[in-house]
Image (cartoon, rainbow, N blue to C red):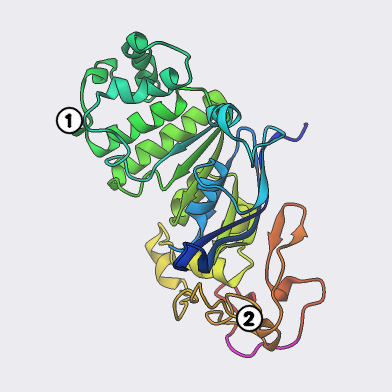
């Protein structure tokens, strides 16, 4: 069986944000929100990007969708480098890449109808005229399980789940090859979250889009993703198939995140050992030397203070950035103990 086509390939992505500027507007201090990220997304598959707030996952999604400009690195979409696309070339890129925003309440113009919101991309990209908007909005609304009559309503007449369906319908209007969904269910109640997640699954099965799903919720990502990339402090620190990451996490940070996900079985939940991380994310203006996770890591070693572990392949489908899993792993741990699964980090 042939390998699925790589639709998105991001290489060496870096994004800096200025913190302070000089009198003349020059950046004096910057933080690296994204610091050398490599990712690939195959056609018809979902890549889940998870991590704590401030890990850089949303910025990566915005870079892929070209809502932010990378300072370094390249982004290829369907084999074409789109990193420096401008004008008409960028407009063509945006037909292929669509973004679903986190907040369905803020993502829709309250002064426009639902039909206008859904069909506007078709007008902007000159697929239809303004007079045809309602006619094209109806089928798009049906595709996300909404009555075509919703086209005449305004966003404030809809529930949160209905608004998010409208946002998804708008993203599908141009038949993109890639959907970037930034926390698409975080503003919704639990029952509505399930509906939206199942809708995204159905759309992918029907149309074969590649999906980049950004979330802090491992349970959500485990439900949807084929592959998972775990981010910490602007970098990917572990990546693999969804089964690999959720069933046998390798990096101690991934182990800690997964230990916080409640188990559906109460007996299993009571018997689980929680891996608690102490401390907060490092100061982005003063990143620690060596491994950026070492100040919070329960199994840090002496070498972690001086060696910055690269993201290396440790199996056919898996990569990890941890000195304990490098080809020549250094000596004994300074602190910590084996994790709940009996493995050291």
Residue designated by label 2: 289
Q: Residues within 10 Å of mark 1 (few under 14, many from 20)?
A: few
Q: Which mark is residue 157?
A: 1
Residue at image x 42%, y 32%? 199
| Position of the C terminus by quadrant | bottom right
The region drawn magenta spans 331-336
Q: Residue 92 location in percent, x, y? A: 58, 26
Q: Which of marks 1 and 2 is nearer the N terminus?
A: 1
Q: Which SS does the magenta portion mostly show?
A: loop
Residue at image x 29%, y 37%? 161
Spot the residue most to the front: 24
Q: Residue 79 location in percent, x, y? A: 72, 34
> Is residue 332 magenta-colored?
yes
Q: What element carries label 2?
A: loop
Residue in front for this viewpoint, 287 or 210: 287
Q: What element carries label 1?
A: helix
């Amino acid at each position: 069986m042939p390998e699925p086509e790589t639709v998105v390939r991001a290489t060496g992505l870096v994004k800096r944000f200025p913190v302070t500027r000089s009198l003349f507007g020059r950046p004096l201090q910057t933080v690296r929100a994204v610091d050398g990220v490599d990712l690939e997304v195959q056609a018809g598959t979902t890549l889940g990007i998870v991590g704590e707030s401030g890990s850089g996952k949303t910025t990566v999604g915005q870079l892929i969708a070209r809502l932010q400009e990378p300072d370094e690195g390249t982004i290829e979409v369907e084999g074409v480098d789109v990193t420096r696309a401008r004008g008409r070339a960028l407009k063509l890129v945006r037909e292929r890449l669509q973004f679903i925003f986190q907040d369905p309440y803020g993502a829709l113009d309250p002064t426009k109808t639902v039909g206008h919101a859904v069909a506007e991309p078709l007008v902007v990209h000159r697929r239809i005229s303004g007079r045809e908007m309602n006619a094209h909005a109806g089928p798009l609304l049906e595709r996300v399980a909404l009555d075509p009559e919703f086209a005449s309503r305004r966003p404030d007449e809809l529930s949160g789940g209905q608004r998010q369906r409208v946002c998804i319908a708008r993203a599908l209007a141009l038949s993109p090859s890639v959907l970037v969904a930034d926390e698409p269910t975080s503003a919704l109640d639990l029952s509505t979250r399930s509906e939206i997640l199942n809708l995204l699954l159905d759309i992918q099965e029907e149309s074969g889009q590649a999906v980049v799903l950004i979330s802090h919720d491992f349970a959500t990502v485990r439900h949807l993703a084929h592959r998972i990339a775990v981010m910490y402090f602007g970098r990917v620190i572990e990546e693999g198939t969804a089964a690999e990451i959720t069933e046998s996490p390798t990096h101690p940070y991934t182990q800690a995140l997964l230990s916080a996900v409640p188990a559906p079985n109460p007996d299993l939940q009571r018997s689980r050992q929680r891996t608690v991380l102490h401390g907060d994310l490092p100061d982005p203006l003063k990143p620690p030397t060596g491994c950026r996770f070492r100040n919070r890591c329960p199994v840090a070693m002496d070498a972690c203070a001086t060696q910055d572990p690269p993201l290396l392949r440790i199996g056919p489908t898996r990569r990890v950035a941890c000195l304990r899993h490098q080809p020549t792993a250094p000596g004994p741990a300074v602190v910590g103990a084996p994790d709940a699964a009996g493995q050291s980090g």
